[in-house]
Amino acid sequence: NATREAGPVMGGRTVIAFVTDPDGYKIELIQRA
């Protein structure tokens, strides 16, 4: 379940997204450009 859709960080090219795993833990995914 995505709590924040993938998108660029303000003023940068890094893309982040937040997801919640089945146990309820929130995970931040980071893709550096």
Image: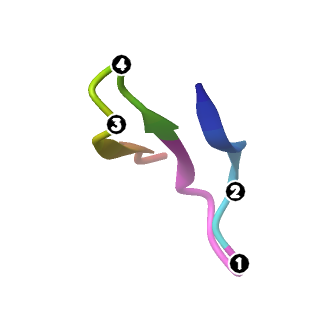
Left or right for 4, reference 28: right
Name the one closer to the observer, 21 or 17.
21
Q: Which residue, given by chain and number where applicable, does mark 3 sit on? A: 24
- Horizontal and vertical percent for residue 23? 27, 26
Which mark is on residue 10?
Answer: 1
Magenta includes 13? yes
User: Tags 2 and 1 in contact by the CB under 8 Å rule?
Assistant: yes
The amino acid type found where label 1 is placed reads Met
- Horizontal and vertical percent for residue 29? 39, 41
Q: Residues within 10 Å of mark 1 (few under 14, many from 20)?
A: few
Question: Marks 2 and 4, Cα distance to the nearest angstrom?
Answer: 25 Å
Question: Marks 1 and 4, Cα distance to the nearest angstrom?
Answer: 29 Å
The amino acid type found where label 4 is placed reads Pro
> Please, is residue 13 above or below residue 28 in the view?
below
Magenta stretch, residue numbers:
10-18
User: Tags 4 and 3 in contact by the CB under 8 Å rule?
Assistant: yes
Q: Which residue, given by chain and number where applicable, does mark 2 sit on? A: 8
Q: Which numbered disc, 3 or 2, marks the residue that appears first in the sequence?
A: 2
Q: Secondary structure at mark 1?
A: loop
Left or right for 20, reference 15: left
Name the one closer to the observer, 31 or 27.
27
Magenta includes 22? no
Q: Which residue appears at 70% of the width and 81% of the height? A: 11
The amino acid type found where label 2 is placed reads Pro
* Nearer to us: label 2 or label 4: 4
Q: Secondary structure at mark 4?
A: loop
Q: Which residue appears at 53% of the width and 50% of the height? A: 16
Q: Residues within 10 Å of mark 4 (few under 14, many from 20)?
A: few
Q: Which residue, given by chain and number where applicable, does mark 4 sit on? A: 22
Q: Which numbered disc, 3 or 1, marks the residue that appears first in the sequence?
A: 1
Q: Which numbered disc, 2 or 4, marks the residue that appears first in the sequence?
A: 2
Q: Which residue appears at 28% of the width and 41% of the height? A: 25
